[in-house]
Amino acid sequence: MQALSINMSFTSKYHASAEQISSEFMQIEAAKRDATNFGPIYNKYYKQIFGYIYQRMEDKDVAFDVTSQVFLKALTNLHKYEFKGVPFASWLYRIAHSEVMQVFRDKKSSRTVNADVADIKHLCEEIQESYYEDFMPVLGRIIKELPNDELQLIEMRFFEKRPFKEIAEIMMMTENNAKVKLYRILERLKKVLTKKSK
């Protein structure tokens, strides 16, 4: 069974303006023509992708290795990248997600979840439940038992504050499908927490 820890940690926001996305598109096109232009993209996203990977496994050496593999695959497959109106980071996260899941399948690392109290409160508000401190271990147990794809939805939506469009791109599903799946997970959580609060 995957290991789980809910840690108090800072999580940054994942949003980009239309202007930033347009500028980034030009950088990517330049990198497609000449691989030496990939440097600025690597520098821009390395810390972000490393953070995404590291907070899911908490083994720094493995996280460094996986991050390197992500950027190697990104550079090798850059010619296949197609702009879909979301930040380039979404494509990198998709590769990172795939690499992280492969590590778990190979049993090289334990699965970790990082969230802070504000994230848990937001999650409780979403399912129309007041937050109680004793929800932490209950939610920890429930989250621990979620399949990886469902855990990813909770993480990306509530702990990383990603928009559904980006979540759908990372997980290779439609935006509507991502919303429906998350709604079903929240319904299950609500049933458990409703019993707990009575």
Image (cartoon, helix red, strand yellow):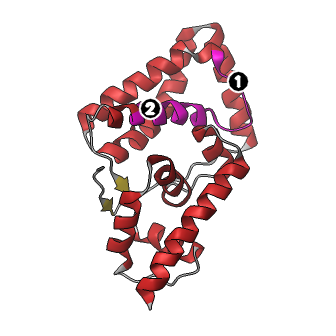
Q: How packed is label 1: few (under 14 Cα within 10 Å), some, or many (20 or more)? A: few
Q: Residue at x 70, y 26 (%)?
A: 25
Residue 82 has which mark?
A: 1
Between discs 2 and 1, the one toward the N terminus: 2
Provide the secondary structure element on which disc 2 rests: helix
Q: Is residue 73 above or below residue 64?
A: above
Q: Mark 2 points at which residue?
A: 46
Q: Report the front residue among 4 and 81.
A: 4
| x then y, percent, for residue 45 | 50, 33
- The answer to which quarter of the image holds residue 128 is bottom right
Amino acid residing under circle 1: Glu
Q: Is the magenta stretch mostly helix, strand or loop?
A: helix
Give the spatial CA distance, label 2 vs label 1. Answer: 20 Å
* Mark 2 touches mark 1? (CB < 8 Å): no
Q: Is residue 84 magenta?
A: yes
Residue type (three-letter) at the residue carrying disc 2: Tyr
* Residue 152 in magenta stretch: no
Residue at 65% from the left image edge and 37% from the top image edge: 87
Q: Specify the segment rendered in magenta.
A: 80-101
Residue at the extreme bottom of the image, as rendered: 198
> Residue 186 appears at what percent x and percent y?
56, 67
For residue 172, which numbered disc appears in the image? none
Which of 89/183 is in front?
183
Indicate the quadrant where residue 110 lies: top left
Q: Residue at x 66, y 29 (%)?
A: 24
Q: Position of residue 1 (x, y in %)?
A: 29, 50
In this rendering, the answer to whether 194 lies above or below 79 is below
Nearest-to-viewer mark from 2 and 1: 1
Q: In this view, does 195 lie above or below 148?
A: below
How crowded is the residue under tag 2: few (<14 C-alpha within 10 Å), some, or many (20+)?
some
